[in-house]
Amino acid sequence: MKLTTLLRRSALLLALTASLQAAAAPKKLLVVTVTTGFRHSSIETAEKVLAELGASSGAWTVDYVHQPEGQPKNPGRPPEKQPKDSDESFKAKQDAYSKALADYNTANKLWNDKVIAYMADKMAIAKIKDYDGFVFANTTGDLQLPDRDGFVELIKSGKAFVAMHSGSDTYHPFRRYSEMLGGEFETHKAQVEVQPVLHDPAHPATKHVPEGFRVFDEIYIIKTFEKSKVHGLMGLNAHPNEKTPGYFPISWCKDFGKGRVFYSSLGHREDVWDPTWKEGTKDRKNSPEIAKIYQQHILGGIQWALKLIEADADLGNIK
């Protein structure tokens, strides 16, 4: 056999081996859990579950952009005068609140500066461009990305973007973010049990969700949402609390340029994420089986977004 033929076959074999190794290698996910608004107690649970799902499926590895330390506590709403308050005692409450608010504003300015520097380091495009996908797990507020438009373009170039629950309560003034996601948080009422409609039972994100699935969670009302611009996965045909007719989305996906986007508004509660969280106590509102179904929901959605599993994602399928 000629040397040139041997060399050509060796090169082909090496290329095939490299291709198989690349196909088998887990994808790289960057999980962002920074919040500059409300911070959910379920975030640590979400971080743990996302790592466990990646490890058990072999589909991805996880790195994190955690919350910078030192976020000051907002003093909340100003005091309201109670029947038992005298003018003097109420004024003392007002003065104490005014001081607490002033201290908070000073501390929060310093903390925001810290977030800006932290995100400039952790989320610089040059540092994150080699990740296959990004998960915004219960993020809130302005995340201070050093290049917001560059991040959107990075997703558009072929990356996966996944958001859970308050990932839709993020970057409201930055319209390209909500346009990429497909909708944004408007409000919510009391936590409630709902039975979502399954729009595409064959999709990887919903194929393990049984008919009659019910979940107790904080159900978001979503605005700037258009049925025609997403592939619906789960939704409601009536308001979750008031039961007035109308469409209220819960989960969807869509192509975004060469990239893919998957969103689920579920995930406020720890017992939605984790079947072992306070197992057997009265604090659980969802059975372990419900949490396992939710895990399969996000596992399938992430795998689809990472292009590990193919499925139809035609727009406007919500009837």
Image: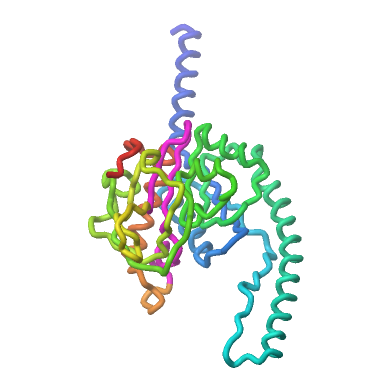
Colour mode? rainbow
Q: How many marks?
A: 0
Query: Residue drawn 58% across and 37% down?
Result: 130
Q: Is residue 268 left or right of residue 238?
A: right
Q: Residue furthest front?
A: 87
10 lies left or right of 91: left
Hey, which quadrant is residue 100 in on the image? bottom right
Q: Is residue 148 above or below residue 89?
A: above
Q: Is residue 109 magenta?
A: no
- Of residues 230 and 285, the one nearer the viewer is 230
Q: Nearer the viewer, residue 63 or 204?
A: 204
Residue 212 x %, y % = 23, 59
Image location of residue 11, percent across then percent down = 49, 18
Say left or right for 58 vs 142: left
Q: Position of residue 198 (x, y in %)?
A: 28, 51
Q: Position of residue 309 (x, y in %)?
A: 36, 39
Residue 38 occupies quadrant: bottom right
In the picture shown, does residue 276 fall above or below 122?
below
Residue at 69% over, 55% down: 115
Nearest the eye: 127 or 241: 241
| Quadrant in the picture for the N terminus | top left
Residue placed farthest to the top in the image? 2
Quarter in which the C terminus is drawn? top left
Q: At 72% across and 75% down in the image, what residue appears?
A: 98
Name the foreground residue: 317 vs 156: 317
Q: Is residue 257 magenta?
A: yes
Where 206 sits versus 98, above or below?
above
Q: Residue furthest left?
A: 211
Stretch in magenta: 250-277
Q: Is residue 133 left or right of residue 145?
A: left
